[in-house]
Amino acid sequence: MEVLSLIDELEDVVEKGVPIPVLGKCMVDKEEILELIQEIRLKLPDDLKQAKWVKEERKRILLEAQNEANNVIKEAESKIASLIDEHELTKKAYEQASEIISNAQKNAREIRLGTKEYADEILSNLERVIQEALEVLHKNRQELKK
C-alpha cells in the first residue's frame, strides 16, 4: 500500500531530524512533513475504495455461492423426480441428493467463511494503517503545537 510507504517516509523524516538534546526533541523540515501528510490524505481514499471493493466482492461471492448451492439443490431435486418410479433407484437418488445438498451447503458455508475472513483481514489491515496514520498525524500535530 502506498500509504504505508508514505508513513515510512514520514517516520524517516522525523528520525533524521536534528536532535535538540536538552528537550529530547528534534527539528524537522515542516514543508517535507506537510507534503507527506498531504500525499497520505490523497492516497487514503484509494485504500478506502479498495476496502469497499473487498466488501462488495465478498457480497458477490456469497451470492454466487448461494446461487451455486441453489442450483445444486435444484439439480438434486430434478434427479430425484426422474428416479421416483423405481424403488431401489429412488432410495439411491435420495441418498445422492442428500449428499449433494450436504456438500453444496458445506461448500457454500466454507466459501462464506473464507470470504468473511478475507474481508475481515483486509479491513483489519486497513483499520491498522489508518490508525497508525492518525497516531502519526496526531503526534506530529502535537509536536507542531509545542
Image (cartoon, rainbow, N blue to C red):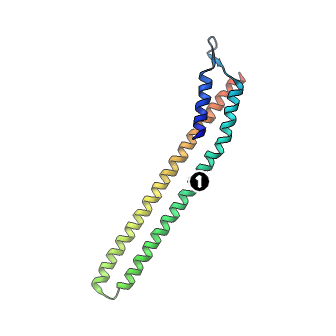
Q: State the image coordinates of residue 46 (x, y, percent, origin top left).
A: 63, 46
Q: State the image coordinates of residue 11 (x, y, percent, origin top left).
A: 59, 28
Q: Is residue 33 above or below residue 82?
A: above
Q: The residue under label 1 is which amino acid type?
A: Trp
Q: State the image coordinates of residue 97 (x, y, percent, origin top left).
A: 36, 75
Q: Residue at x 62, y 31 (%)?
A: 136
Q: Is residue 7 left or right of residue 96?
A: right
Q: State the image coordinates of residue 75 (x, y, percent, origin top left).
A: 42, 76
Q: Residue at x 42, y 59 (%)?
A: 110
Q: Is residue 23 above or below residue 56?
A: above
Q: Of all residues shown, which one is farthest toward the bottom?
A: 85
Q: How many numbered marks have been drawn onto this rendered protein structure?
A: 1
Q: Is residue 116 above or below residue 76?
A: above
Secondary structure state at the residue bearing disc 1: helix
Res. 9 image quadrant: top right
Q: Residue at x 41, y 67 (%)?
A: 104
Q: Residue at x 33, y 79 (%)?
A: 93
Q: Is residue 107 left or right of residue 92?
A: right
Quadrant of the drawing holding the C terminus? top right
The answer to whether residue 28 is visible is yes
Q: Of all residues shown, which one is farthest toward the top?
A: 22
